[in-house]
Amino acid sequence: MPILKLHVDRTCDARIDPEGVRTLLVDLRAILCERLSSAEAACQLAWLPVTGLPDQPVVNCELAILPKPERTREKLTELAEVLKARIEEVTGPKVAVRISHLDAATYVALK
């Protein structure tokens, strides 16, 4: 159940095609499903326009996942690199990717 939030500085708005954003989200979901062995229905992705400081990354990608033994640090680092490269194709450079684990014992989701 990957939860991916893309915090995108509003300064990117003028140069990013809205249809490109939808395509990007579909592509990112496919990457997450493949690399994390997750079903599409379990994924939640969001593109969130924000106002940030000029010395910060233009895009901050935050991925929250439940831990699994096969989700090693090495595999998650590789995933972060893939996500960063794909996002930069649409937004340009200055993308930060962060991956964190949710606490399975306390995590609750109602849909």
Image (cartoon, rainbow, N blue to C red):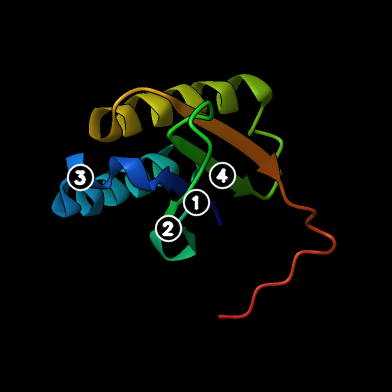
Q: CA distance from mark 1 to mark 4?
A: 7 Å
Query: In the rendered structure, which disc, 3 or 2, sits on the residue that comes first in sequence?
Result: 3
In this view, which residue lies farthest toward the bottom?
111
Q: Which mark's residue is nearer the viewer, 3 or 2?
A: 3
**Which secondary structure, mark 1?**
strand
- Return the residue at label 2: 46
What is the three-letter code of the residue carrying label 1? Answer: Lys
Nearer to us in this view, 56 or 80: 56
Q: Secondary structure at mark 3?
A: helix
Position of residue 40 measured from the top left corner of the image (x, y, whole percent): 39, 59
Of callouts 2 and 1, the N-terminal one: 1
- For label 1, the residue is 5
Label 4 sits on what residue type?
Leu
Vertical comparison of 9 with 94: above or below: below
Mark 4 packing: few (<14 Cα in 10 Å), some, or many (20+)? many
Tag 4 residue: 63
Task: Compare marks 4 and 2 and give the one earlier in the sequence.
Answer: 2
Q: Secondary structure at mark 2?
A: strand
Task: Indicate which label's residue lies in the foreground, 4 or 2.
Answer: 2
